[in-house]
């Protein structure tokens, strides 16, 4: 199944996709958009262009597993992208993905403007890898998660 992951942000939204076999997750792009409706539109269009069969949106839960204001905004974003694209969508725990993405970029010595331009796509890739790993290990279908 072709899956697209989204690391939604107020100014930058990272996008990653996997291949049909769900073996490889790769960063695709970063959408630079502060307007929520335009970001939803661009994300839905990209999902269609990528031929995504499922959209996974990162859910920034608090460390104590509660849902805060940011997670609610991400859920609203997910619902609107699902409605706009006609593609099923789910939320997926994204705690610490931006920190891990930063660690990966440190390891590759990616700094400055280059770092800022890719960190959100790398975070989306980590969200997607986590989701794919869960699917592979649990054998559950998207609607069962």
Image: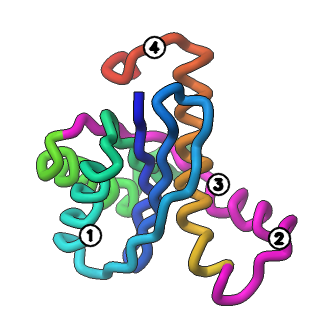
Mark 4 and mark 3: span between their CA atoms? 24 Å
User: What span is colored magenta in the figure?
Assistant: 87-114
Instruction: Give the crowd class for mark 1: few <14, some 14-19, many >=20 residues within 10 Å.
Output: many
Instruction: Describe residue 142's horizontal placement relative to residue 120 as left or right.
Output: left
Instruction: Describe residue 19's horizontal placement relative to residue 86 as left or right.
Output: right
Whether residue 63 is visible: no
Above or below, 102 against 91 in this view is below
Mark 4 and mark 2: span between their CA atoms? 34 Å
Q: Is residue 108 magenta?
A: yes
Q: Which mark is residue 140?
A: 4
* Residue 37 percent location from the top left of the image: 17, 70
* Residue 20 percent location from the top left of the image: 46, 30
Instruction: Give the crowd class for mark 3: few <14, some 14-19, many >=20 residues within 10 Å.
Output: some
Circle 1 or circle 3, nearest the eye: 1
Instruction: Give the crowd class for mark 4: few <14, some 14-19, many >=20 residues within 10 Å.
Output: few
Extreme top residue here? 139
Circle 3 or circle 2, nearest the eye: 2
**Residue highlighted by disc 1:** 39
């Amino acid at each position: 199944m072709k899956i697209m992951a989204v690391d939604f942000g107020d100014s930058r939204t990272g996008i990653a996709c996997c291949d049909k076999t769900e073996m490889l997750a790769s960063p695709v792009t970063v959408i630079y958009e502060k307007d929520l409706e335009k970001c939803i539109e661009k994300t839905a269009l990209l999902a269609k262009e990528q031929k995504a069969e499922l959209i996974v949106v990162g859910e920034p839960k608090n460390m104590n597993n509660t849902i805060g204001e940011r997670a609610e905004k991400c859920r609203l974003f997910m619902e609107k992208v699902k409605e706009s694209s006609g593609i099923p969508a789910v939320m997926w725990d994204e705690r610490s993905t931006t920190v891990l993405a930063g660690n990966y970029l440190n390891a590759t010595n990616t700094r400055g403007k280059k770092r800022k331009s890719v960190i959100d796509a790398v975070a989306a890739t980590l969200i997607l890898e986590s989701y794919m790993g869960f699917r592979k290990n649990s054998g559950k279908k998207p609607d069962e998660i």
